[in-house]
Amino acid sequence: MFQLGNTAALIWSIIFGSIGTSFAIYGKRQKAIVPLCIGVALCIFPYFIENVYVLVFVGVVLMAIPYFVRV
């Protein structure tokens, strides 16, 4: 998962996990499937990506999806 000393990846993972938790709570309360799924994805995906640049790119793309996908 993370190499010892890769602080940037750890901090970005915490940030995206927090944002994902907020999306998931919002999606559950509003009964909206897109924010709920994106929130769960934001909480899970940092476990699988080690490169910081890819981590930030995927996180920003996931956060932008609910803006463009209205269901």
Image: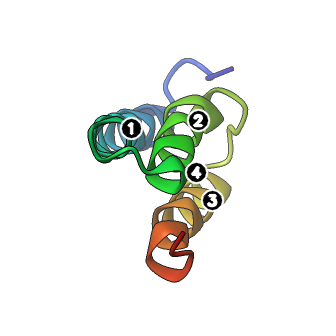
Secondary element type, mark 1: helix
- Disc assigned to residue 24: 1
The kind of residue on which mark 4 rests is Val
Question: Does residue 3 lie above or below 55 as drawn?
Answer: above
Classify mark 4: residues with Cα within 10 Å, few (<14), some (14-19) or many (20+).
some
| Label whose residue precedes the other's in the sequence (2 or 4) | 2
Quadrant of the snapshot with the C terminus: bottom right
Say whether marks 3 and 2 touch (CB < 8 Å). no
Q: Nearer the viewer, residue 55 or 8?
A: 55
How far is disc 1 from disc 3 in space, using C-alphas?
A: 17 Å
Residue position for label 2: 46
- Single out the mark in the foreground, 1 or 3: 1
C-alpha distance separating marks 3 and 2: 9 Å
Residue at figure coordinates x 49%, y 72% from the top left: 64
Do tag 1 and tag 2 residues touch (Cβ < 8 Å)? Answer: no
Give the residue drawn at x 67%, y 58%.
Answer: 54
The vertical placement of 64 against 11, above or below, is below
Q: Which residue is mark 4?
A: 52
Q: Are marks 2 and 4 in contact (CB under 8 Å)?
A: no
Marks counted in the figure total 4
Residue at screen point 34% across, 34% down:
21
Q: How was this image coloured?
A: rainbow
Q: Nearer the viewer, residue 20 or 67?
A: 67
Answer left or right for 37 relative to 39: right
- Within the image, what quadrant is residue 48 found in? top right
Q: Quadrant of residue 41?
A: top right
Q: Tell me where residue 16 appears, x and y as whole percent.
A: 40, 44
Three-letter code for the amino acid on which mark 2 is drawn? Pro
Q: Check disc 1 and give the amino acid type.
A: Ala
Work out how far the residue at label 4 is from the one at label 3, CA to CA, in angstroms. 10 Å
